[in-house]
Each structure stands twice: as C-alpha cells, then as structure tokens.
Image (spheres, rainbow, N blue to C red):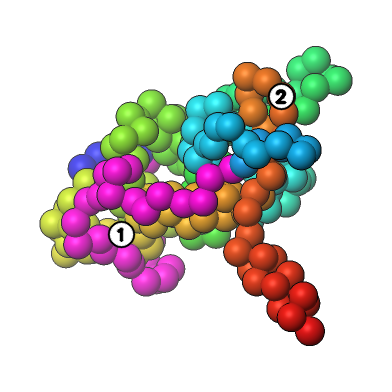
Amino acid sequence: MSSTGDDTAVGGLCAVHVPRTARTVTDLPRLTRFPAVQPGQPAIERLTPTSELIGYRGPTACAAAGITYRQLDYWARTGLLEPSVRSAYPATSQRLYSFRDILLLKIVKRLLDAGVSLQNIRVAVAHLQSADQADLTGLTLMCDGATVYECTTAQQVVDLLKGGHGVFGIAVGAVWQELELALGRLHAERTDTGETLVGHDPADELAQRRNRAV
C-alpha cells in the first residue's frame, strides 16, 4: 500500500467500495467489438475498445468520462492529463485519447468530486500512468479528501479504515469495466489507418426492431 499525498485525514465524504478479490484484465467480460466502417463489405478485423490500435476523439472521451470539453481541454493544456495517442499540435490535428487515458480521466473526475486537490491528483495520475496496465484492474484507490492511497488487497482497505483513513474508494477494475461498456457503444478511430470505427449500442438495435414490428 502506498500513499500519493500527505497523511492529513479529512472525514465524511462517501461510502467505501471494498473489493473481495483483485481481478486481472483477463477476468473482465469480453464486449461487443468495433466493426470497421466498410460500406457494402463486412468488417475483416474486429477490435475491442481497449486495443492499442484504437483512439478516441475529445467529444467521445468527454462522453465516456462524464466530463465537459472545457475540463478536458484545460487538463490537457495544463499537463494534468494529455492524450497519449495524438496531441492537438499542430493546430490542424485533433486530440486522440487511448482507453487508458479515458480511464484516468474518469478517475480524475471522481477524485475531484471527492475533494482531492489538483496537486495530489497530479501525483496520483503520474503514479497510475507508470503502472502496468495488467495491474490497474486490481487496484483500489482510497482517499480521505487530502491523501490518495493505493490498495492492492481488501485487507489493505480494511487496515486504512481501521486507522481512520480512506472514506472514499475507487475500485479501478469496476471503472475499467464500466468504461469498456460505454466505449463499445461510441465511435472511435483506428490509429494505424485513420478509419472510423462505429460502436454498437444494443439499445438502438432493440429500438429498430420494435419500430419494424409496428
């Protein structure tokens, strides 16, 4: 267990989520994959939302992370969280975010909502960016409004609570799964070819079937 801030405790934010067991990426359910846009032709290759060959533009990143474009732009310009696939420079290009980037955007939003300072969030983001992707889903971030702690086991979470710390928790694996579901319904872009990938929303398909039945 490690701390990414100071040890000042601030009480009373919200409920704690304590994972029973750590999960790896392979434990998460596989989702509907993106079909490449090929008019009149079936997609030859299908990619998951987490693939390194997929990037997401700013509006999609905002929709999936639950933030405004103003927040996204500010965080990129101030270096809090810049897109790892493609930056906005030169000015003619559009930012392109990876799945991991958007995962961190969601975590930043939740930490801000919990009252964590931008200074401590910067430290937490830098730490998460350096972590192996396979390890992220087994992490639980605990914070007391001032300090962010990284827990890899449920016992570490319990120990924090016993010590009077950690009144707010983020199970990264749960955020990962939630984000993968959301991005599977949104448009993306292949980073190697630049082609558009269309997401699949089961709700839209169900609505179309109902309309045809009327």
Main secondary structure type of the part rendered in magenta: loop
- At a point 52% along the width and 55% down the height, the residue shown is 181
Residue at the location (74% across, 80% down)? 213
Residue range in magenta is: 5-34
For disc 2, the marked residue is 194
Within the magenta stretch, is there residue 16? yes
Whether residue 51 is visible: yes
Q: Is residue 177 above or below residue 130?
A: below
Q: Residue at x 80, y 15 (%)?
A: 90
The answer to whether the residues at label 1 and label 2 have Cβ atoms under 8 Å apart is: no
Identify the image quadrant of residue 142.
bottom left
Q: Quick one: SS at disc 2?
A: loop
Vertical position of residue 195 compared to residue 12: above or below: above
Res 61 quadrant in image? top right
Please identify the quadrant where the N terminus is shown: top left
Amino acid at circle 1: Gly
- Residue at the limit of the structure toward the top, as seen here: 90
Q: Which residue is mark 1?
A: 166
Residue 56 seen anywhere in this rendered image of the structure: no
What is the three-letter code of the residue carrying label 2?
Gly
